[in-house]
Image: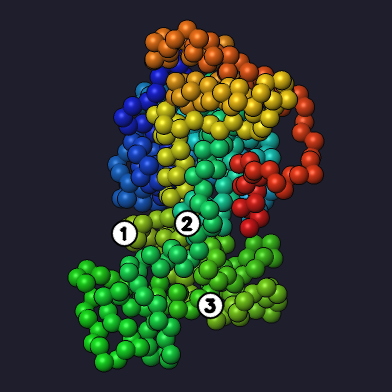
Amino acid sequence: MYKYMIGHGRGFVRAVELFCGAGGMSRGLVDAGFEVVRAYDAWPIAVETYRRNIGPHVVEADLNNLLSIVSQISTLAPDIVCGGPPCQDYSLAGRRQEGQNASMTIAFAIVVTTVRPQWFLMENVVQAQKSQAWAEARAMLKRAGYGLSESKINAAYYGVPQSRRRLFVIGRLGEKDGFLQSAIAAKASAAPMSLRQFFGSAVPNTVFFPATSDARRSFYSADESAPTIPERPIRPLPEGHRYHPADVALLENGYVYSRPVRGGRGVRSIDEPIATITRTSWERPTPRYLGAPHHLDPVVATDTAVLTVDQIARIQGFPADWAWGDIAKRDILQMIANAVPAPVARSLGEVILERHRGQSGPAIEGHFVDWLVRGGRNRATAHNVKANVGRARRLLGGRTFADAGHELLALETASGFDALPKNTRSDLRRALAVLAEFEASKLRKPRRPRRSAALRPLEPESAEALKQAA
Ligand SMILES: C[S@@+](CC[C@H](N)C(=O)[O-])C[C@H]1O[C@@H](n2cnc3c(N)ncnc32)[C@H](O)[C@@H]1O
């Protein structure tokens, strides 16, 4: 029997992470409910930071030594292998030439295809999707039987106040490509998170009264009386309540600067997310930038708040109590810039766990009901077929199957299917077969653009594209 037909996962899902860095991705996966049983990285400083903050299961190892690593990981029998292979070779700031680091993407695929976990999760810069290394890695993963969901995600829609676009590829044995796309899109927030939302909530129950002079503050606890009503005394703050003075300074200032990549805007309002965090996000504007500032900068770059390393780490999803230890600032910033923001990893981890446990199913992409009606069914029957697809997929634990024969076999053996009346069983089989015809028809006929495009509901890809553009 195929591994992916055994049934829904229960309890903890065991994860192994490659290229774990300081532990941004691991932290998010643990928050989502994974048990990370082993993590690997070659950089001693990152390994020590990971050990201090996440746990002792981290191992310092060069993942070029695949022979020993693969056998270790196989013994651990993970349900999922995760990782963000190093990306300088692809990134905008990098050399744009594929080299040693790009081959780590292939090393990731070799580990996955040899260990054959049910799932994998890979993160990289968006440019990696067009690379030769990913083309090779992708072909290996497809040959090994993985269905792939490839999503370009903007972190600002997944819990951090930062416009950071990254490629996330999630694979699962036996699935159809795109199997998780709708669930990932559904997890996105309606609007990007702004710095004000993020840092405002770091000062709990805060009330904002704009200061009328430099000597006064603008943020007050909800337990204090309003500063504009002087006769009422200000009550003491609740015990344990702590303002982050730097956050208050940032909120009061209202603007931040971060060095733009490729001539972008350097100054952002706190009502927006900040630009992608890099190793230089703490730097003040250079004379060169000040000599030719971006024409859309809302204020002069030197008038913006100065971000602390602690704030940069929090914007990147590290918790406020994260212990960096006594190490060089440049190493801390490198680990921060490298990381997958934990809230992003958490969101994707939740999407994976919900599907793994059969608690979510894929949306049917496209106009299935209209297609059925065009094929001669009346609308009520067409809706019935669609409902039966939903019912069959629930019995299948939300799974899709690249192979129609496997799908039918899995349905026949799904718990509860046998107990259904004979007619219902045939309806469910038929519904999946009709859906397969619909999906095949979409592949045969590339969709022609229609004039009413603006009126159609957004599909996950286009919804994401709009968010990226926002
Ligand atoms: C993009 S970072 C990963 C960050 C991590 N996902 C996180 O969320 O914090 C890539 C990591 O790969 C590690 N690395 C690079 N080459 C390696 C190799 N040959 N073997 C093991 N780790 C390597 C680097 O030290 C770096 O920490």
Q: CA distance from mark 3 to mark 1?
A: 26 Å
Closer to us: 92 or 202: 202
In the picture shown, does residue 416 fall above or below 269? above
Disc 3 crowd rating (10 Å Cα; few below 14, some 14-19, many 20+) is many
Tell me where residue 63 appears, x and y as whole percent.
48, 35
N-terminal label among 3 and 1: 3
Contact between labelled residues 2 and 1, with CB atoms less than 8 Å apart: no
- Looking at the rendered structure, the secondary structure element under dot 2 is loop
| Left or right of 446 in this view: 195 | left
Disc 2 crowd rating (10 Å Cα; few below 14, some 14-19, many 20+) is many
Which dot marks residue 321? 1
Tell me where residue 162 appears, x and y as whole percent.
52, 59
Closer to us: 211 or 129: 211
Amino acid type at image mark 1: Asp
Residue 40 visible, this orientation: no
Amino acid type at image mark 3: Thr
Q: Is mark 2 within 8 Å of ligand 1?
A: no
Which dot marks residue 160? 2
Residue at the spot of label 3: 304
Query: Which mark's residue is nearer the viewer, 1 or 2?
Result: 2
Q: Quadrant of residue 437?
A: top right
Amino acid type at image mark 2: Val
In the picture shown, does residue 152 fall above or below 415? below
| Left or right of 225 in this view: 453 | right
N-terminal label among 1 and 2: 2
Tell me where residue 6 appears, x and y as whole percent.
41, 16
Q: CA distance from mark 2 to mark 3?
A: 20 Å
Give the colour scheme of this rendering: rainbow
- Looking at the rendered structure, the secondary structure element under dot 1 is loop
In the picture shown, does residue 56 fall above or below 295? above
